[in-house]
Image (spheres, helix red, strand yellow):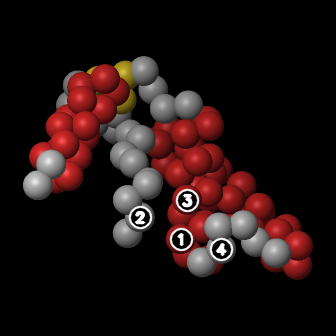
Amino acid sequence: MCRNIKTLFNFEPPVMDEEIRGAALQFVRKVSGFHKPSKANEAAFLAAVEDITAAFSKLLSTLETNAPPRSRAEEAAKARSRAARKFSR
C-alpha cells in the first residue's frame, strides 16, 4: 500500500513511539490523500493519527512470535542492497 510504512514488529531494539506515530501519520496521509490537511480538516486528521497510533501500539504490544528478533542494522543493509540492485540498472 505505502512504501514508506515499514514493518515494526519483532526488532531489536524494540520499536520506539516515534516510529509508531510516523507509521500512523503515513497511513493517514495515504488514506486521506492529504500530506498536510487544511485548517478545517486538521483536527480530524490529527485525531486519526492519534487513534491509529494507539491501535498500532496495542497491536505491537500484543503480538507474539517464536522467531528471534531481527536486527535493525541487518534489515537496513538488506534494504540498501535491494535499492542498489534496483536503481543500478
- Tell which circle, 1 or 2, labels the residue nearer the N-terminal end: 2
- Tell which circle, 2 or 3, labels the residue nearer the N-terminal end: 2
Instruction: Specify the amino acid type for callout 3.
Output: Gln
Residue farthest right in this picture: 39
Residue at 62%, 47% in the rendered image: 21
Labels 1 and 4 touching (C-beta < 8 A): no
Labels 1 and 2 touching (C-beta < 8 A): yes
**How dense is the environment of label 2, judged by Cα within 10 Å: few (below 14), some, or many (20 and up)?**
few
Labels 2 and 3 touching (C-beta < 8 A): yes
Residue at 55%, 39% in the rendered image: 19
Front-most of residues 43 and 67: 43
Q: Position of residue 26 (x, y in %)?
A: 55, 59
Q: Which residue is mark 2?
A: 2
Instruction: Specify the amino acid type for callout 2.
Output: Cys
Q: Position of residue 18 (x, y in %)?
A: 62, 37
Residue at 62%, 77% in the rendered image: 32
Q: Circle 2 — which element?
A: loop
Q: Which residue is mark 1?
A: 30
Q: Circle 1 — which element?
A: helix
Whole-number angstrom distance, CA of label 3 to CA of label 4: 10 Å
Q: Which residue is mark 3?
A: 26
Labels 1 and 3 touching (C-beta < 8 A): yes
Placement of 8 over or under 40, stated as above or below:
above
- Tell which circle, 2 or 4, labels the residue nearer the N-terminal end: 2
Q: Quadrant of residue 41?
A: bottom right
